Image (spheres, rainbow, N blue to C red):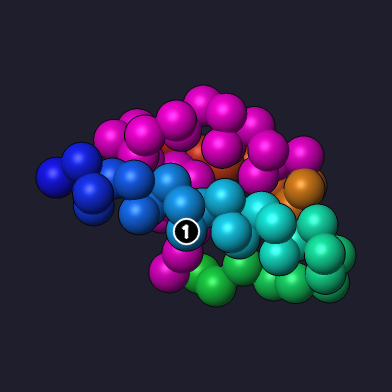
Amino acid sequence: MRTFFTALSVYAICYLLVRIARPAFTLPEDSRILFEEDWVPGREAIAKAFEQLFKERASHG
């Protein structure tokens, strides 16, 4: 399970890095779960970065 949760965190961080490199990048709708659900490790920090980069609210699931 630890590997799964680590992979989710890495995917979320990769989306954030892509947004930094390509400001016009649009997050795929199905990937929003990485920034919305409480069970994603490090959700608070990842959601805050999401909100700053995408200028959208990362709503709780």
Dominant SS of magenta comes to: helix
Q: Which residues are magenta?
A: 30-52
Figure quadrant of residue 57: top right
Residue 30 coordinates in the image, percent (x, y): 43, 69
Residue visible at 47% across and 52% down in the picture: 10
Q: Is residue 22 left or right of residue 2?
A: right
Residue lying farthest to the top in this orientation: 44
Q: Is residue 38 left or right of residue 46?
A: left
Q: Is residue 9 above or below residue 27?
A: above
Residue visible at 35% across and 39% down in the picture: 40
- Amino acid beneath label 1: Tyr
Question: In this orientation, which residue lies closer to the viewer: 47 or 16?
Answer: 16
Residue 40: within the magenta? yes
Question: In this orientation, which residue lies closer to the viewer: 52 or 2?
Answer: 2
Split into 4 quadrants, where in the image is the C terminus?
A: top left
Residue 16 coordinates in the image, percent (x, y): 66, 54
Residue lying farthest to the left in this orientation: 1
Residue visible at 58% across and 59% down in the picture: 14
Figure quadrant of residue 50: top right
Q: Is residue 30 above or below residue 38?
A: below
User: Mark 1: few, some, or many residues within 10 Å (few <14, many ≥20)?
Assistant: some
Q: Give the secondary structure at mark 1.
A: helix
Residue 2 coordinates in the image, percent (x, y): 20, 41
Residue under circle 1? 11
Residue 29: within the magenta? no
Q: Is residue 19 left or right of residue 50?
A: right
Split into 4 quadrants, where in the image is the N terminus?
A: top left
Q: Is residue 61 visible?
A: no
